[in-house]
Image (cartoon, helix red, strand yellow):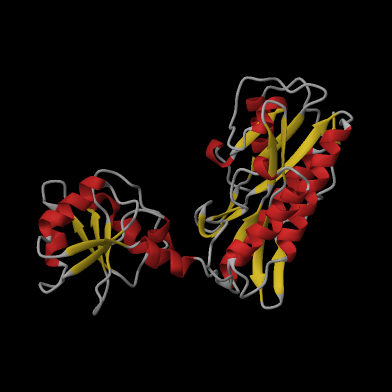
Amino acid sequence: MVSPSADLVYLTGYNAPNFERPTLLILPQRGDPLFVVPQLEADKARAASPDIEVRAWGDAEDPWVVVRAGVRNDARTVAVSDDMRASFVLAIQRTLSGAQLEAAGSLMASLRQYKEPDEIACLREAAHRTDVVFDRLRTETLAGLAEPEVADLIGRHLKAAGLTWKWSYVCSVASGENSSSAHHTLSARTVKAGDAVCMDFGGKYGDYPSDLTRTVHVGAPAREFTEVYAVVQDAQEQGVRAVRPGVLAGEVDRVARDVITRAGYGPYFVHRTGHGLGLEIHERPYIVAGSREALAVGMVFSVEPGIYLPGRFGVRIEDTVVVTPDGCERLNLSTHELCVVR
Protein backbone atom coordinates (compact mmCIF):
# COMPACT_ATOMS: atom_id res chain seq x y z
CA MET A 1 0.00 0.00 0.00
CA VAL A 2 1.48 3.27 -1.18
CA SER A 3 0.38 6.63 0.20
CA PRO A 4 1.16 10.11 -1.24
CA SER A 5 4.91 10.22 -1.79
CA ALA A 6 7.59 10.09 -4.45
CA ASP A 7 6.85 6.35 -4.63
CA LEU A 8 3.26 7.11 -5.65
CA VAL A 9 4.45 9.55 -8.32
CA TYR A 10 6.86 6.93 -9.64
CA LEU A 11 4.17 4.24 -9.88
CA THR A 12 1.21 6.31 -11.07
CA GLY A 13 2.30 9.77 -12.12
CA TYR A 14 -0.11 11.22 -9.55
CA ASN A 15 1.42 13.72 -7.11
CA ALA A 16 -1.35 13.41 -4.53
CA PRO A 17 -1.68 15.77 -1.57
CA ASN A 18 -0.74 14.17 1.74
CA PHE A 19 -3.81 15.26 3.66
CA GLU A 20 -5.74 13.64 6.49
CA ARG A 21 -8.06 11.98 3.98
CA PRO A 22 -6.33 8.71 3.00
CA THR A 23 -5.20 8.17 -0.57
CA LEU A 24 -3.85 4.64 -1.02
CA LEU A 25 -2.62 2.67 -4.01
CA ILE A 26 -3.21 -1.03 -3.28
CA LEU A 27 -0.92 -3.38 -5.22
CA PRO A 28 -1.91 -7.02 -4.71
CA GLN A 29 0.58 -9.79 -5.30
CA ARG A 30 -1.89 -11.16 -7.84
CA GLY A 31 -4.53 -9.20 -9.72
CA ASP A 32 -4.99 -5.56 -10.67
CA PRO A 33 -4.04 -2.51 -8.62
CA LEU A 34 -6.66 -0.33 -6.97
CA PHE A 35 -6.63 3.38 -6.14
CA VAL A 36 -8.63 4.31 -3.04
CA VAL A 37 -9.00 8.09 -3.04
CA PRO A 38 -11.18 10.82 -1.53
CA GLN A 39 -14.04 11.87 -3.80
CA LEU A 40 -12.42 15.31 -3.98
CA GLU A 41 -9.36 13.79 -5.69
CA ALA A 42 -11.04 11.19 -7.91
CA ASP A 43 -10.93 13.13 -11.18
CA LYS A 44 -7.25 13.98 -10.79
CA ALA A 45 -6.36 10.39 -9.89
CA ARG A 46 -8.20 9.04 -12.94
CA ALA A 47 -6.56 11.59 -15.23
CA ALA A 48 -3.08 10.75 -13.94
CA SER A 49 -3.62 6.97 -13.95
CA PRO A 50 -6.30 6.06 -16.51
CA ASP A 51 -5.36 2.36 -16.45
CA ILE A 52 -5.91 1.93 -12.71
CA GLU A 53 -9.33 1.38 -11.16
CA VAL A 54 -10.23 4.27 -8.87
CA ARG A 55 -12.64 3.78 -5.96
CA ALA A 56 -13.66 7.11 -4.48
CA TRP A 57 -15.06 7.58 -1.00
CA GLY A 58 -17.05 10.51 0.34
CA ASP A 59 -16.61 12.35 3.60
CA ALA A 60 -19.60 10.59 5.15
CA GLU A 61 -18.07 7.17 4.43
CA ASP A 62 -15.41 5.13 6.23
CA PRO A 63 -12.43 4.86 3.83
CA TRP A 64 -11.09 1.82 5.67
CA VAL A 65 -14.19 -0.16 4.72
CA VAL A 66 -13.28 0.57 1.09
CA VAL A 67 -9.69 -0.46 1.76
CA ARG A 68 -10.79 -3.69 3.41
CA ALA A 69 -12.99 -4.56 0.42
CA GLY A 70 -10.01 -4.07 -1.89
CA VAL A 71 -7.70 -6.53 -0.14
CA ARG A 72 -7.84 -10.32 -0.50
CA ASN A 73 -9.16 -12.12 2.55
CA ASP A 74 -6.05 -14.31 2.70
CA ALA A 75 -3.56 -11.40 2.70
CA ARG A 76 -0.96 -12.16 5.34
CA THR A 77 1.67 -9.49 4.68
CA VAL A 78 1.12 -5.84 3.82
CA ALA A 79 4.05 -3.57 2.95
CA VAL A 80 3.35 0.12 3.56
CA SER A 81 5.16 3.28 2.43
CA ASP A 82 8.01 4.35 4.69
CA ASP A 83 6.60 7.87 5.00
CA MET A 84 2.95 6.90 5.41
CA ARG A 85 1.13 8.82 8.14
CA ALA A 86 1.20 6.94 11.45
CA SER A 87 -2.57 7.29 11.72
CA PHE A 88 -2.95 5.48 8.38
CA VAL A 89 -0.58 2.70 9.43
CA LEU A 90 -2.51 2.17 12.66
CA ALA A 91 -5.81 2.16 10.78
CA ILE A 92 -4.49 -0.46 8.35
CA GLN A 93 -3.31 -2.52 11.29
CA ARG A 94 -6.81 -2.41 12.80
CA THR A 95 -8.56 -3.02 9.47
CA LEU A 96 -6.36 -5.97 8.46
CA SER A 97 -5.77 -7.43 11.90
CA GLY A 98 -4.67 -10.78 10.50
CA ALA A 99 -1.87 -9.32 8.38
CA GLN A 100 1.73 -8.53 9.29
CA LEU A 101 2.81 -4.99 8.35
CA GLU A 102 6.23 -4.36 6.85
CA ALA A 103 8.02 -1.37 5.35
CA ALA A 104 7.93 -1.05 1.55
CA GLY A 105 10.81 1.41 1.37
CA SER A 106 13.61 -0.98 0.41
CA LEU A 107 11.51 -2.54 -2.34
CA MET A 108 10.63 0.83 -3.86
CA ALA A 109 14.16 2.16 -3.50
CA SER A 110 15.52 -0.86 -5.35
CA LEU A 111 13.22 0.01 -8.27
CA ARG A 112 13.70 3.77 -8.28
CA GLN A 113 17.50 3.83 -8.06
CA TYR A 114 17.82 2.56 -11.65
CA LYS A 115 16.80 5.52 -13.79
CA GLU A 116 15.08 5.11 -17.14
CA PRO A 117 16.34 7.16 -20.13
CA ASP A 118 13.50 9.70 -19.80
CA GLU A 119 14.35 10.20 -16.12
CA ILE A 120 18.02 10.71 -16.93
CA ALA A 121 17.07 13.20 -19.64
CA CYS A 122 15.13 15.27 -17.09
CA LEU A 123 17.97 15.09 -14.55
CA ARG A 124 20.49 16.10 -17.23
CA GLU A 125 18.40 19.08 -18.30
CA ALA A 126 17.89 20.17 -14.69
CA ALA A 127 21.65 19.95 -14.10
CA HIS A 128 22.57 21.87 -17.25
CA ARG A 129 20.13 24.66 -16.43
CA THR A 130 21.57 24.86 -12.91
CA ASP A 131 25.06 25.19 -14.42
CA VAL A 132 23.77 28.28 -16.23
CA VAL A 133 22.61 29.67 -12.89
CA PHE A 134 26.08 29.27 -11.36
CA ASP A 135 27.68 30.92 -14.38
CA ARG A 136 25.40 33.91 -13.80
CA LEU A 137 26.11 33.96 -10.05
CA ARG A 138 29.84 34.25 -10.76
CA THR A 139 29.20 37.68 -12.28
CA GLU A 140 27.07 38.98 -9.40
CA THR A 141 28.21 41.17 -6.51
CA LEU A 142 27.65 39.14 -3.33
CA ALA A 143 29.39 41.44 -0.83
CA GLY A 144 26.81 43.41 1.10
CA LEU A 145 24.03 40.85 0.68
CA ALA A 146 22.64 38.88 3.61
CA GLU A 147 22.53 35.11 3.12
CA PRO A 148 18.74 35.10 2.48
CA GLU A 149 19.26 37.76 -0.16
CA VAL A 150 21.83 35.54 -1.89
CA ALA A 151 19.30 32.68 -1.73
CA ASP A 152 16.65 34.95 -3.26
CA LEU A 153 19.10 35.89 -6.01
CA ILE A 154 19.71 32.19 -6.70
CA GLY A 155 15.97 31.63 -6.79
CA ARG A 156 15.43 34.37 -9.38
CA HIS A 157 18.14 32.89 -11.59
CA LEU A 158 16.66 29.39 -11.24
CA LYS A 159 13.25 30.67 -12.32
CA ALA A 160 14.82 32.52 -15.24
CA ALA A 161 16.47 29.24 -16.27
CA GLY A 162 13.06 27.55 -16.38
CA LEU A 163 13.44 25.54 -13.18
CA THR A 164 10.80 25.21 -10.49
CA TRP A 165 12.22 26.64 -7.31
CA LYS A 166 11.22 26.86 -3.68
CA TRP A 167 13.12 27.75 -0.54
CA SER A 168 13.59 24.13 0.51
CA TYR A 169 15.71 23.50 -2.61
CA VAL A 170 18.30 26.03 -1.40
CA CYS A 171 19.97 23.72 1.05
CA SER A 172 22.74 26.13 2.03
CA VAL A 173 24.04 29.62 1.52
CA ALA A 174 26.87 29.77 4.01
CA SER A 175 29.26 32.72 4.20
CA GLY A 176 32.46 33.24 6.15
CA GLU A 177 32.62 31.13 9.32
CA ASN A 178 29.14 29.76 8.53
CA SER A 179 30.65 27.84 5.62
CA SER A 180 32.42 25.62 8.17
CA SER A 181 29.00 24.11 9.01
CA ALA A 182 28.23 21.42 6.45
CA HIS A 183 24.46 21.76 7.00
CA HIS A 184 24.16 25.49 7.53
CA THR A 185 21.07 26.87 5.85
CA LEU A 186 20.51 30.62 6.08
CA SER A 187 21.25 33.28 8.68
CA ALA A 188 21.12 37.06 8.84
CA ARG A 189 24.90 37.27 8.29
CA THR A 190 26.00 39.67 5.56
CA VAL A 191 28.58 38.56 3.02
CA LYS A 192 31.76 40.64 3.09
CA ALA A 193 35.18 40.79 1.45
CA GLY A 194 37.42 37.91 2.52
CA ASP A 195 34.54 35.44 2.88
CA ALA A 196 34.19 31.97 1.48
CA VAL A 197 30.61 31.46 0.29
CA CYS A 198 29.41 27.86 -0.07
CA MET A 199 26.20 27.64 -2.12
CA ASP A 200 24.27 24.35 -2.37
CA PHE A 201 21.18 24.74 -4.54
CA GLY A 202 18.97 23.32 -7.26
CA GLY A 203 15.60 23.40 -8.95
CA LYS A 204 13.24 20.98 -10.66
CA TYR A 205 12.79 20.23 -14.33
CA GLY A 206 9.61 18.20 -14.64
CA ASP A 207 9.54 16.13 -11.48
CA TYR A 208 13.33 15.81 -11.25
CA PRO A 209 15.69 18.06 -9.26
CA SER A 210 19.22 19.27 -9.67
CA ASP A 211 21.73 19.53 -6.83
CA LEU A 212 24.86 21.62 -7.25
CA THR A 213 27.39 22.96 -4.75
CA ARG A 214 30.09 25.47 -5.53
CA THR A 215 32.27 27.44 -3.09
CA VAL A 216 33.43 30.88 -4.20
CA HIS A 217 35.58 33.50 -2.50
CA VAL A 218 34.80 37.21 -2.17
CA GLY A 219 38.00 38.97 -3.17
CA ALA A 220 41.46 37.46 -3.29
CA PRO A 221 41.72 34.35 -1.06
CA ALA A 222 44.48 33.63 1.44
CA ARG A 223 46.93 30.83 0.63
CA GLU A 224 45.35 28.40 3.12
CA PHE A 225 41.95 28.71 1.48
CA THR A 226 43.50 28.14 -1.94
CA GLU A 227 45.28 25.02 -0.65
CA VAL A 228 42.12 23.59 0.97
CA TYR A 229 40.13 24.32 -2.16
CA ALA A 230 42.68 22.44 -4.28
CA VAL A 231 42.44 19.39 -1.98
CA VAL A 232 38.63 19.30 -2.25
CA GLN A 233 38.84 19.82 -6.01
CA ASP A 234 41.19 16.84 -6.34
CA ALA A 235 39.06 14.68 -4.01
CA GLN A 236 35.94 15.41 -6.06
CA GLU A 237 37.73 14.65 -9.32
CA GLN A 238 39.16 11.37 -8.03
CA GLY A 239 35.77 10.37 -6.64
CA VAL A 240 34.10 10.91 -10.01
CA ARG A 241 36.85 9.00 -11.81
CA ALA A 242 36.27 6.01 -9.50
CA VAL A 243 32.63 5.66 -10.61
CA ARG A 244 31.90 2.73 -12.93
CA PRO A 245 29.63 -0.33 -12.95
CA GLY A 246 30.55 -2.92 -10.34
CA VAL A 247 32.48 -0.56 -8.07
CA LEU A 248 31.14 -0.50 -4.52
CA ALA A 249 29.57 2.75 -3.34
CA GLY A 250 31.85 2.62 -0.31
CA GLU A 251 34.89 2.50 -2.60
CA VAL A 252 33.96 5.82 -4.22
CA ASP A 253 33.71 7.31 -0.74
CA ARG A 254 37.10 5.83 0.18
CA VAL A 255 38.81 7.23 -2.91
CA ALA A 256 37.54 10.77 -2.29
CA ARG A 257 38.15 10.56 1.46
CA ASP A 258 41.72 9.29 1.06
CA VAL A 259 42.70 12.41 -0.89
CA ILE A 260 41.50 14.60 1.98
CA THR A 261 43.04 12.35 4.65
CA ARG A 262 46.46 12.32 2.96
CA ALA A 263 46.39 16.12 2.92
CA GLY A 264 45.87 16.13 6.70
CA TYR A 265 42.21 17.17 6.73
CA GLY A 266 40.56 13.79 7.31
CA PRO A 267 38.75 14.77 10.55
CA TYR A 268 37.19 17.74 8.74
CA PHE A 269 35.38 15.72 6.07
CA VAL A 270 32.32 15.05 8.20
CA HIS A 271 29.68 13.59 5.87
CA ARG A 272 29.22 10.90 3.22
CA THR A 273 30.56 11.55 -0.27
CA GLY A 274 27.17 11.46 -2.00
CA HIS A 275 23.53 10.50 -2.25
CA GLY A 276 21.17 9.32 -4.94
CA LEU A 277 19.07 11.82 -6.85
CA GLY A 278 15.71 11.21 -8.50
CA LEU A 279 12.16 12.11 -7.63
CA GLU A 280 13.60 12.95 -4.22
CA ILE A 281 16.65 15.06 -3.57
CA HIS A 282 18.09 12.33 -1.30
CA GLU A 283 17.52 8.67 -2.16
CA ARG A 284 19.50 5.49 -2.86
CA PRO A 285 22.25 4.80 -3.58
CA TYR A 286 24.19 6.42 -0.73
CA ILE A 287 27.91 6.91 -1.36
CA VAL A 288 29.02 6.27 2.18
CA ALA A 289 31.94 4.56 3.91
CA GLY A 290 31.45 0.81 4.22
CA SER A 291 28.60 0.53 1.70
CA ARG A 292 28.75 -2.81 -0.15
CA GLU A 293 26.21 -1.74 -2.76
CA ALA A 294 27.61 -2.23 -6.25
CA LEU A 295 27.10 0.63 -8.66
CA ALA A 296 25.13 -0.18 -11.80
CA VAL A 297 24.19 1.49 -15.07
CA GLY A 298 21.41 4.01 -14.58
CA MET A 299 22.20 4.97 -11.00
CA VAL A 300 22.34 8.73 -10.46
CA PHE A 301 24.01 10.33 -7.44
CA SER A 302 26.09 13.23 -6.20
CA VAL A 303 29.83 13.31 -5.56
CA GLU A 304 30.41 16.08 -3.02
CA PRO A 305 33.43 15.87 -0.71
CA GLY A 306 34.16 18.79 1.59
CA ILE A 307 36.51 20.17 4.22
CA TYR A 308 35.09 22.22 7.11
CA LEU A 309 37.47 24.04 9.47
CA PRO A 310 35.44 24.94 12.59
CA GLY A 311 34.77 28.64 13.05
CA ARG A 312 36.81 29.57 9.98
CA PHE A 313 35.63 28.38 6.57
CA GLY A 314 34.52 25.37 4.58
CA VAL A 315 34.74 24.17 0.99
CA ARG A 316 32.46 21.73 -0.84
CA ILE A 317 32.23 20.91 -4.55
CA GLU A 318 29.29 18.84 -5.80
CA ASP A 319 28.31 17.39 -9.16
CA THR A 320 25.63 14.89 -10.10
CA VAL A 321 26.74 11.86 -12.14
CA VAL A 322 25.01 8.96 -13.87
CA VAL A 323 26.64 5.54 -14.12
CA THR A 324 27.23 4.49 -17.75
CA PRO A 325 28.46 1.17 -19.20
CA ASP A 326 32.06 2.42 -19.32
CA GLY A 327 32.18 4.79 -16.35
CA CYS A 328 29.98 7.77 -15.66
CA GLU A 329 28.65 10.97 -17.19
CA ARG A 330 28.87 14.21 -15.27
CA LEU A 331 25.52 15.92 -15.50
CA ASN A 332 26.99 19.17 -14.15
CA LEU A 333 29.51 20.90 -16.39
CA SER A 334 30.10 24.24 -14.62
CA THR A 335 33.70 25.03 -13.70
CA HIS A 336 35.44 23.55 -10.67
CA GLU A 337 38.14 26.24 -10.72
CA LEU A 338 38.27 28.58 -7.75
CA CYS A 339 36.02 31.51 -8.63
CA VAL A 340 36.73 34.91 -7.09
CA VAL A 341 33.66 37.13 -6.97
CA ARG A 342 32.91 40.67 -5.89
Q: In which quarter of the image is the C terminus?
A: top right
State left or right for residue 240 relative to residue 87: right
State left or right for residue 126 relative to residue 342: left
Q: Can residue 225 be seen in this view?
A: yes
Residue 239 in the image: state x and y as whole percent: 71, 59
Name the residue located 84 percent from the left edge and 40 percent from the top edge. 227
Q: Which of 104 and 231 is in front in this view?
A: 231
Q: Nearer the viewer, residue 98 or 287?
A: 287
What is the quadrant of residue 107 in the picture?
A: bottom left
Q: Is residue 124 visible?
A: no
Name the residue located 11 percent from the left edge and 51 percent from the top edge. 62
Query: Height in image: 222 above or below 159?
Result: above
Q: In which quarter of the image is the N terminus?
A: bottom left
Name the residue located 65 percent from the left edge and 59 percent from the top edge. 254
Residue 177 in the image: state x and y as whole percent: 69, 26
State left or right for residue 194 relative to residue 300: right
Query: Height in image: 232 above or below 327?
Result: above
What is the quadrant of residue 35 in the picture?
A: bottom left
Query: Height in image: 203 above or below 278?
Result: above
State left or right for residue 136 relative to residue 277: right
- Total marks placed: 0
